[in-house]
Image (spheres, helix red, strand yellow):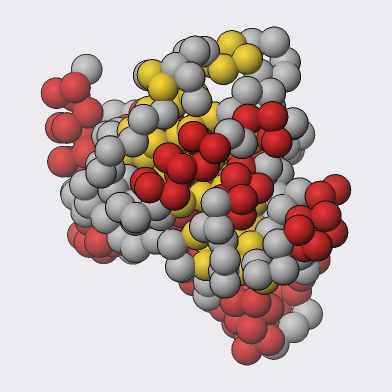
């Protein structure tokens, strides 16, 4: 899950009783959204419980499962999800199963209190990890062999840990970005953020940064300007001038805050807006190119293919065949 991949990524989820419903959704919903936006199955998953019974979440809404957690030699990533009263479910048998399956898994993730299960099974020894802020000190004292980091989520080699539901959503966006593209992660993030209506209706069609949080006000202002100028993109110099900083300084701020250069984010905004028009409208590609800031249909098609690994016409043809 940490490197680009074209094939469908399968994930196993072990969900413990008394897990928050929102924690499960924080893992699954971004994957579902990625499949919907891509128009194909990028991810699929199975949910297991320790005994094969439906999971009783803290909200009282049960989650059906595929069966009991009885791993063999599966290599797919395993996410262990837990919220409350984890000790009651950390049985000798479950810890033995986790230890055994870790020999084969390409990746194991402790989601919120799921990190306690990995630590109890010595699967976080000599790894960096995080935990929910309420439990951070207790976890640090209990497992001195684990290097604790005060981050929302931590990816360290074959181990992942998160500090709660929203950090888990951030994690899933990061995994989608690494495996597919920044633009797909950006578009998925857009589905999980509410924004008040703006003054221009057409801006509602442009993806925003969503859960990719912007900590610098100047970068936030740059992102808003990008959203407002999709049809006629500004140069980096003009963008920086509007914000009262140098182009080089804006580039540095953007890289530090967003993890990408300004032009990467700008292009992702434009291509995501274009892709929605390709999928949701019958507009000519020349009109879509003009509406999203491309000089010509050929330039748009080249950029679209490089990003989505298919041409605009292939996208329409593929989705038409599925309907």
Task: Please name whichever residue, 191 or 94, is drawn nearer the observer in this view of the structure.
Answer: 94
Location of residue 277 by image quarter: top left
Q: Could you tell me residue 71's position as x and y percent?
A: 33, 36
Give above or below for 317 relative to 17.
below
Residue occupying the point 28% across, 48% down = 75
Q: Could you tell me residue 224's position as x and y percent?
A: 68, 56
- Total of numbered circles in the picture? 0
Q: Could you tell me residue 59's position as x and y percent?
A: 72, 15
Give above or below for 182 relative to 255.
above
Quadrant in the picture for the C terminus: top left
Location of residue 179 by image quarter: bottom left
Q: Is residue 313 visible?
A: yes
Horizontal placement of 20 versus 34: left or right? right
Residue occupying the point 72% across, 53% down = 131
Give above or below for 240 relative to 90.
below
Residue occupying the point 68% across, 42% down = 113
Task: Please name whichever residue, 235 or 208, is drawn nearer the observer in this view of the structure.
Answer: 208
Q: Could you tell me residue 203's position as x and y percent?
A: 61, 41
Q: Residue at the far front: name it.
A: 92
Horizontal placement of 65 versus 216: left or right? left
Quadrant in the picture for the N terminus: bottom left
Task: Please name whichever residue, 250 or 107, is drawn nearer the observer in this view of the structure.
Answer: 107
Residue occupying the point 52% across, 67% down = 156
Q: Is residue 297 visible?
A: no
Task: Please name whichever residue, 45 or 264, is drawn nearer the observer in this view of the structure.
Answer: 45
């Amino acid at each position: 899950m940490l490197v680009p991949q074209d094939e469908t990524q399968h994930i196993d989820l072990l969900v413990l009783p008394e897990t928050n419903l929102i924690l499960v959704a924080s893992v699954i919903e971004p994957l579902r959204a990625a499949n919907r936006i891509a128009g194909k199955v990028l991810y699929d998953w199975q949910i297991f419980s320790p005994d094969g019974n439906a999971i009783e979440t803290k909200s009282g809404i049960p989650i059906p499962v595929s069966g009991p957690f009885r791993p063999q030699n599966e290599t797919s990533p395993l996410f262990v999800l837990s919220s409350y009263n984890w000790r009651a479910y950390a049985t000798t048998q479950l810890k033995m199963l986790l230890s055994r399956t870790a020999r084969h898994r390409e990746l194991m993730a402790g989601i919120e209190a799921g990190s306690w299960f990995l630590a109890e099974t010595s699967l976080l020894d000599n790894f960096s990890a995080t935990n929910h802020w309420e439990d951070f000190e207790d976890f640090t004292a209990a497992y001195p062999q684990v290097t604790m980091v005060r981050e929302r989520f931590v990816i360290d080699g074959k181990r992942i840990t998160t500090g709660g539901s929203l950090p888990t959503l951030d994690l899933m966006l990061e995994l989608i970005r690494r495996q597919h593209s920044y633009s797909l992660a950006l578009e998925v993030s857009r589905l999980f953020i509410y924004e008040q209506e703006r003054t221009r209706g057409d801006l509602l069609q442009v993806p925003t940064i969503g859960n990719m949080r912007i900590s610098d006000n100047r970068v936030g202002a740059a992102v808003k300007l990008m959203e407002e100028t999709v049809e006629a993109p500004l140069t980096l110099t003009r963008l920086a001038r509007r914000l009262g900083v140098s182009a080089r300084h804006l580039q540095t701020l953007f890289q530090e805050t967003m993890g990408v250069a300004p032009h990467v984010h700008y292009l992702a905004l434009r291509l995501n807006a274009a892709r929605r028009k390709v999928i949701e409208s019958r507009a000519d590609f020349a009109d879509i190119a003009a509406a999203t800031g491309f000089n010509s249909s050929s330039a748009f098609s080249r950029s679209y293919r490089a990003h989505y690994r298919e041409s605009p016409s292939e996208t329409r043809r593929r989705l038409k065949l599925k309907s």
